[in-house]
Image (cartoon, coloured by chain):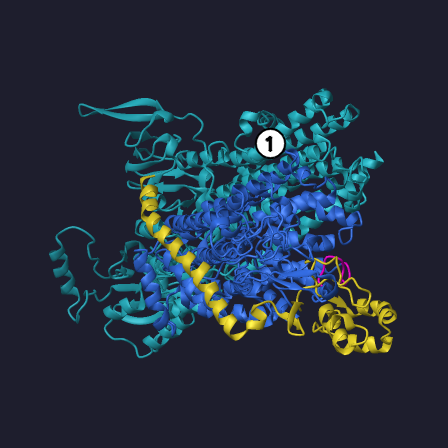
Amino acid sequence: MILVVAILSGRFLAPYITRVFSRSPSRLDKVLNPIEKGIYRLISVDPARGMGWKEYFLAALVVNIFQMAIAFIIFAFQGVLPLNPQGFPGLSWDLAFMQVISFGTNTNLQHYNGEGNCIQLPNCAALTPGVPGLSYLSEMMAVQFLQFTSAATGICVAVAMIRGFVAHSKDLGNFYVDFTRSLTRILFPLCFVASLVFVGLGVPQTLTGYHIVSTVEGATTRATQTILVGPVASLVSIMQLGTNGGGYYGANSAYPFQNPNPASDIFQIFLMLLIPTTLCFVFGQLTGKKRETRPILWGAYSLFALDLLIAFTPNLPVVGPGMEVRFGGFFSVFWTVVTTAVTTGSVNASLSGLNPLVILSAFNGMLIQATPGGKGVGVMYMVMFIILTVFIVGLMSGRTPEYLGLKITARDVKLVMIAFLVHPVIVLVPTVLAYSTGAAGAIGVGTSSIGFTKIFYEFTSAAANNGSDFLGASANTPFFNISTALVMFLGRFAPIGLLLSLGGSMINRKRLTTEAGVRTDSPLFALILVGSILVLVLLTFFPFLALGPILEFFQGHVNGF
Amino acid sequence: MSTRLSKMMSARRTTLISRKVLIDSLVRLSPLRLIANPVMLIVEITFFIVIAMALDPEAFPRLASSSLQVFYVEVALILLITVWFSTLSDALAESQAKNTANSLRRLEMEVSSKKILIEAGSRRIVPTPSRELRTGDLILLEKNDTVPIDAQVLEGIAMVDESLLTGESTAVRKAPGDDVIGGSQVLSDTLTAKVTVNPDETFINQMIRMVESSKRPKTPNEQAVTIVLIGLTAIFTILIGALLGVSLVLSLAADLSVLIALYVCLLPTTIGALLPSIGLSGISRLYKEKIVAKSGRAVETAGDTDVILLDKTGTITVGNRQAVEFLPFLEFNERDVGEAAFLASWHDDTPEGRSLIRLAYEAGFVPKEMNALDASEVYEFSASTRTSGVKLAGGTGFMLPKSGGTGRERGRLRRKFEPHVEGGVPIGSDETEIIKGAPDAIKKIVKSVPADYDKIVQEISAAGDTAMALSRNREAIGIVRLRDVLKPDIREKIMAVKVMGIRPVMITGDQPLTAKSIAAEVGIDEYQPEAKPEDKYDIVKREQAETRIVAMIGDGTNDAPALAMADVGLAMNSGTQAAKEAANMVDLESNPAKIIEVVMLGKQLLMTRGAVTTFSIANDVAKYFAIMPVLFASTVPELKALNVLGLGLNTAVLSALIFNAIIIPLLIPLAMRGVTFKPSGTMTLFLKNTMIYGFGGVIVPFVGIKLIDIAISLV
Amino acid sequence: MMNFKREFRQNYSPAMRLAVISLVLCGLVFPLVITGIAQVFLPSQANGSLVQLHGKNVGSSLIAQTFSLPIFFHPRNDSASGVDPDITVKDAYSQIPRISSATDISVDMLQQIVNQNEEGTFWIFGTPYVNVLRLNLVLIQTNNSAYGAFQ
């Protein structure tokens, strides 16, 4: 049901997004044009000027780095900055470094708790040092800020790559303009509505400090309770819509203030799926080949269905330890599959409470990254897989491979292979390093299949810019902060650069208008695509999966015990 | 190809396989030679590692055990055999291609030539080895000489035997301006010729260069496939490296040799081993068709062909039309037409002319004027009037002298004997002038046009036949129906082309009705009637503007621009040098219908490469299930649950490794002869092959490894 | 390389300015606008869905509160967030005998209270559940005798 609604909404939202990026006239122009023009004037950018892939990538990279630098300052100095009613101290430099990269790359791996130590009930009025927390200012001007900008960047680079495939395009567009418009015309309006819906459903949005109330039993025991409020709703909207996943609270969307009831749960799942699904349609509409949405959408959702199948193999789960009663077993598992399929990484249950097969399915989503994948990059990865499939399998049609009428050259194959290669390098190597340097042991993670799963999952999640994890604040050590930061940065910008280059190289390339090649819009091609993706990804990661969740399953671990 | 030649070839091949190929394949095992094939080089490196493990297990603490020395030797042997299978396939393909190329040439044999030196106005003949000839040198070719190198005739007329090169057994007449091919033999007379190529630029040498694997440039598609293979190799190297690391840091006690076995099994060894020979044998299949491609790229492009331009004559029909019926006009009868045709064709040596005589003779229409034929005046066919004919002097009448005097004098004489002429050339009263030609040309010269003239001509055209009109003494007497003879199985070939989604376009000089009828008969929907050579260029340009890939054939200099522009241009060896230079392939047999085979070959080449690549990658799935349960058997016994095949723990690794090696020679025949396919649409081929080589590629190794495992455990 | 440097310089200044502008828009303007609207139109939810007893805030209906006395329903303590405000109806039933014996409220009565406060909108997928704090407040408000100390 949710999936159907998400796909339908994507179908209806896509024409609007397509128009935003093809800069077609819109009713919003009256209001937004002056604002946007003001921004272009402030940054002295000519909105009409197009960029090649190198300049586009560079602009995106530089803007992102500046944004991360600003956020770093806010994290590091939150102790002396305003809007810190709880008086949280600044983050250590390695944690601040890791967190800005984490939010700036749309990963949202969190090695802290937003509420610091206050997760300990009933009383956290007296803050104890140890577990870092975030001030309201950090939540707004570092976390939310980067969640918006990284989501916008994701949409921009995907659209830029798609533009390369558009016939007669001369450039990939202007990053500054795309970025501005994706904020003003897509993310702000959608998040505005979503935030207010969340407030209506019970998600707090306030800048007053935590409430300290005398509890019911306090009438006799003088016990008090701290109610951890804050500007939560505005953050939750962008973190789900932008497939960021970094929650306000350490417990993420399991925390009732972030996800108060079944309705908010379903709405968040819907928001996560919305834009990745929409971008599948945007691909077809922007390129003017609407049928070419099919392999991307069908491929993505078939893999997604497969993930669900794996996750639900061990019976329909009931409320177990580590799950929230209001969501029940089904929606805890469903959420986990969705959040990894779209690389959001938010959680509404504790991962260790889930069956190893659910975790296996989560791995699947993160290793493929295109089911339908993160905001923007999901489409890019799917195009990468399509090109690989068309090239290897498509040769058997007896024609030199082509996609969208473009002949696939040796250089394209090289770019795609390198983009594909990045992932195993940044997942497998640090996993081994975490053990060989003793970093895993230092935070109490053992060498059993359960421990191995946790470490492997941490780097898979970092590389896929997903952000869900087992370790949480326990991984706040220099090794994990720095290693995951590097993995996240490479996992984000290396494939983006390579795939932008791929898009850029399509400009001015001879386009065959004949439809004599392999029809990528046929259902059977989607099936073959899914098969190829599974074979390629499983071949690359199978031994590690075998030592992790698969072994856990064979060893009979259920619900982490 | 003559049977003598093919026997010679096959005899030579059988002897080559046994010794030269074997030695060559062993020489190729040298790591230096393997640098061109990184996948196999890595396999050879792992062989050295495992050999070291066998020799000194203690040198590999935590990774090797001295109790497994025998196992290490077995693994090492299989690894080496894997590499050898690969070099064997290379050596085989190269020797096969070279054999085919060699059989096509004599040039490689050192021929002594007679170089003409002109010094101070006098000519001097200098014996020169063919190797030392250069473009522009003059050579003398005498009877029984072997033409040392491709050259153009400057002086003399001679008969030359080109059968060794073209398979055409009749001797060819060579006159000034014609090209002679190196390796052919002069049968009569003497020629002076100018060398047109340097020795290493000849077709034959271009061919030879393309089959030497070390020098052969990789085609664009081969380069791209190689990148995929290198990428996969990099991925598996990282994976196995990381797995080795995990095994050490988590103390999982994996044996290095098993890890190496997994590594080699995962590497795309099958396609890595066969990739060079697939390309090579594709080219040698072309050679067997007697087609020389100037680059492998052109062969690949042929597979992409969207539009194929077919010259009607030679491709769809055999070169000549045959007379099938005499159609008299109202006042005449069939005999009149038949006899006129007989007379007019007596001096016409073309197959068309001969067919006229045959038809007339078989119908008994032998004219009484036959005895006058010897003394007749022949009008040779002229392109400007598009007619030919004969003028017979009557038995008793005055014989107009054929020569002597001036033209004006002869004209005066003629007027004297034929006073009542109204236009046209006057004819003597007892003379008979018979002219045959295109109906519209005859129409112009006859005194009056019969009422049924146009009707008959149109009826013939509408039926796809060609009309030839006959006039006797400027009187139209009848029409001969000439019929195009379709090449055997051309209809099936056109059908196959269409099924594969390629549009055939017929090019013909015929008028529209005839063209339409023939096109319809062979199933072609598009045709260009009344085509001039430059039309081909326009068609190529038009189709390419719509981004289609165009294949065409051509032979004349007029065709050269179109040949150069077309994506696939196949020139006839009988054609001009300009055409051959413009084209990217040359058919030594000059059979234009072969353009279809070229397209099919291109497709087959790509398909084979894709099939083996897909098969190779799909195979890996099963190998995981064979080796993963064993890899950490001592420390993580639960993974034995992955042993879905129920392999023996001691034999699983060897079974997977043997399967991985043995699949290479099993697929050599496939690589050499190419994937067989029924002509069908791109999608159908894609899906069918994906089922066979993709899905099959996943299933086959499960069965194969299990069978090998059973066999090993029995031994 | 020259090209690269030029492009870098070209992007340096606009990038810096865009970073600052986006900081103000995304990090300040947006959350403040939402806060303003929420505080005006949805103040109860925006401030944490606080629950009052006798006009005094005693907690949030969304956050579990520790109940240790036998007369109250107790929340779970093994859930993902640690503050799961709900328990399954089954769990609530299992606590009824304890509460009944501590308060003399009949089992039927307690079952009725639980049933009346049952939530669970997840169709066949959800497990019916009750909010512990709300349940306890209902107990206090409906049973003066047993919960006198909390009146």
What residue is at 74 percent from the left and 70 percent from the top? C150
Where does residue A410 sit, x and y in percent of width and height? 47, 45
Chain ID at mark 1: B
Question: Local crowd at mark 1 within 10 Å, few (<14), some, or many (≥20)?
Answer: many
**Quadrant in which residue A357 is drawn:** bottom right
Disc 1 on helix, strand or loop? Answer: helix
Residue B269 placed where, x, y %? 62, 38
Colour representing chain A:
blue
Give the image location of residue B505, x and y in percent: 42, 62
Q: Is B399 positioned to the left or the right of A370 in the image?
A: left
Residue A39 falls inside the magenta stretch = no
Q: Which chain is cyan?
A: B
Q: Which residue is mark 1?
A: B42
Three-letter amino acid code of the residue under disc 1:
Ile
Viewer-closest of A369 and A351: A351
Q: Nearer the viewer, residue B342 or B324?
A: B324
Residue B104 makes an appearance in the image: yes
- What span is in magenta? A314-324
Mark yes or no: residue B364 visible: no
Q: How many marks?
A: 1
**Viewer-side residue, C25 vs B539:** C25
